[in-house]
Image (spheres, rainbow, N blue to C red):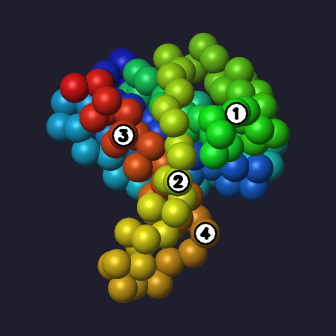
């Protein structure tokens, strides 16, 4: 599939990676499930890139409340390095996105699980990135 203006948002954790997709022309990010961190995550993300014709992968960049790098930052950077060459990689601050994601899901008054929170957080990261580009 040829590259388009489609973006993939990732909220990278040590167990799961939340995934969101957006068509950059309409600027709306939607949750798209999770990828398990089990050794096949790079292949799974590569398949999503091909399936959706993704041009850019937006990765949530974690920092502590003082803005400093953490162990999770190093983990995210290591995963990002493995994704280089699949699509353009950009980072977006992910401060409090999991908290915001859980709040959104609670407001919908429907059941949700950790996977839903991760996917929703990825959508928030991706939406924040697109809005910062306007």
Q: Which residue is mark 4?
A: 114
User: Residue lying farthest top?
Assistant: 85
Look at the image and tell me whether residue 78 can be seen.
yes
Point out the tag, 2 or 4, that comes first from the N-terminus.
Answer: 2
Q: Determine crowd level at label 4: few under 14, some 14-19, many 20+ residues with C-alpha closer than 10 A.
A: few
Q: Determine crowd level at label 2: few under 14, some 14-19, many 20+ residues with C-alpha closer than 10 A.
A: few
Q: Which residue is mark 2?
A: 96
Q: Are marks 1 and 4 in contact (CB under 8 Å)?
A: no
Q: Are marks 1 and 3 in contact (CB under 8 Å)?
A: no
Q: How many marks?
A: 4
Alpha-carbon span between mark 1 and mark 3: 20 Å
Q: Are marks 2 and 4 in contact (CB under 8 Å)?
A: no
Discs 2/4, front: 2
SS of the residue under disc 4 = helix
| Residue lying at 37% horizontally and 19% vertically, measured from the top left | 3
In the image, residue 49 lies at what x, y percent? Answer: 49, 31
Q: Which residue is mark 3?
A: 128
Q: Which residue is mark 1?
A: 68
């Amino acid at each position: 599939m040829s590259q388009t203006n489609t973006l993939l948002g990732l909220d990278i954790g040590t167990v799961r990676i939340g995934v969101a997709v957006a068509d950059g022309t309409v600027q709306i990010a939607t949750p798209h499930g999770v990828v398990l961190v089990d050794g096949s995550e790079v292949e799974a993300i590569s398949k999503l890139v091909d399936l959706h014709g993704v041009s850019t992968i937006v990765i949530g960049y974690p920092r502590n409340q003082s803005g400093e790098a953490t162990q999770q930052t190093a983990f995210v950077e290591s995963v990002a390095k493995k994704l280089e060459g699949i699509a353009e990689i950009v980072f977006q601050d992910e401060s409090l996105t999991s908290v915001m994601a859980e709040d959104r899901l609670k407001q919908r008054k429907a059941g949700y699980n950790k996977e839903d929170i991760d996917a929703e957080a990825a959508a928030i990261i991706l939406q924040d990135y697109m809005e910062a580009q306007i």
